[in-house]
Image: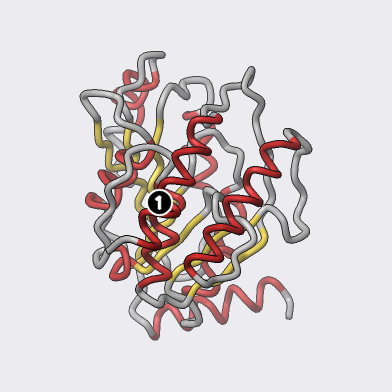
Amino acid sequence: MRPGFGILLASVAARRANIVKLSIVIPVYNERALIPQTLDRVMAAPLPEGLTREIVVVDDCSTDGTREWLGEHAASQPWVTLCLHQRNAGKGAALRTGFAAATGDLVLVQDADLEYDPAEYPQLLSPLLDGRADVVFGTRFLGQTHRVLYYWHAVGNWLLTTLSNMLSNVNLSDMECCYKAFRTDVLRRITLVENRFGFEPEITAKVARLRCRIYEVAVSYSGRTYAEGKKIGWRDGFSALRCIVRYNLLP
């Protein structure tokens, strides 16, 4: 199928399902160098015809000038909702704030560091718009272009994804991928509690428990090194193990 024809079919399905708005939630912490480009690219990202966007930016108490730039350049834009944390609480906490502020029919998570490309929104949203899915996970491991980085990170991701799959009885290839999109009514049925990167295994366990229709879509990946500002660390790997066990096995 030609890509443009697929987007046209998705837009028709969206109108039939009364899906008219996408909320793009961006958690931000100390990304002053990238946040202007991130917002430009998110706003310029293609969407199926008839689908509008709102951008919900949650600054998690940045200290590098990000907060001030957002207040000066983004807060006045009609398509941006700016939420400010008074203390640094973590990505999961920022996403909870963003989800609560979202008013769209669909919600998509976009990190502020541009490791993931907003130009790929149409393919990520397609299973939601044509009615096949309730939740869509991106995956970096199904054939798209990606930057070659840390071997042990890849091993750790595979182990965490495998354990998550075993306990939730789904067959994801990349549970930790940032790109996740949801029908908003699904998110409203879930109570999230993790403050940091434990959001990923927590949301995975909870959408699996709801028996949501989950699809994976291949996405490209331009990862960062720690010198370039990558924030997730080995402690978050152990936290993910705790979350996988807790949210899959406990009530």
The N terminus: image quadrant: bottom right
Rendered position, 169 above or below 71: below
Identify which residue, 113 or 153, lies in the foreground.
153
Mark 1, residue position:
24
**Position of residue 57 measured from the top left corner of the image (x, y, whole percent):** 34, 39
In the image, residue 141 lies at what x, y percent? 72, 55
223 up-or-down from 66: above or below: below
Furthest residue in direction top, as rendered: 64
Please state if 157 lies on the left or on the right of 44 as rendered: right
x and y percentages locating residue 226 in the rendered image: 62, 22
**Amino acid at the residue labelled 1:** Ile
Mark 1 residue element? strand
Which residue occupies the foreground of this view, 234 or 200? 234
The residue closer to the viewer here, 26 or 239, is 239
Looking at the image, which residue is at 75% across and 37% down? Answer: 151
Does residue 56 appear left or right of residue 154 in this picture? Answer: left
Residue drawn where x is 73% and y is 33% of the image: 150
Residue found at x 42% / y 66%: 51
Residue 105: image quadrant is: bottom left
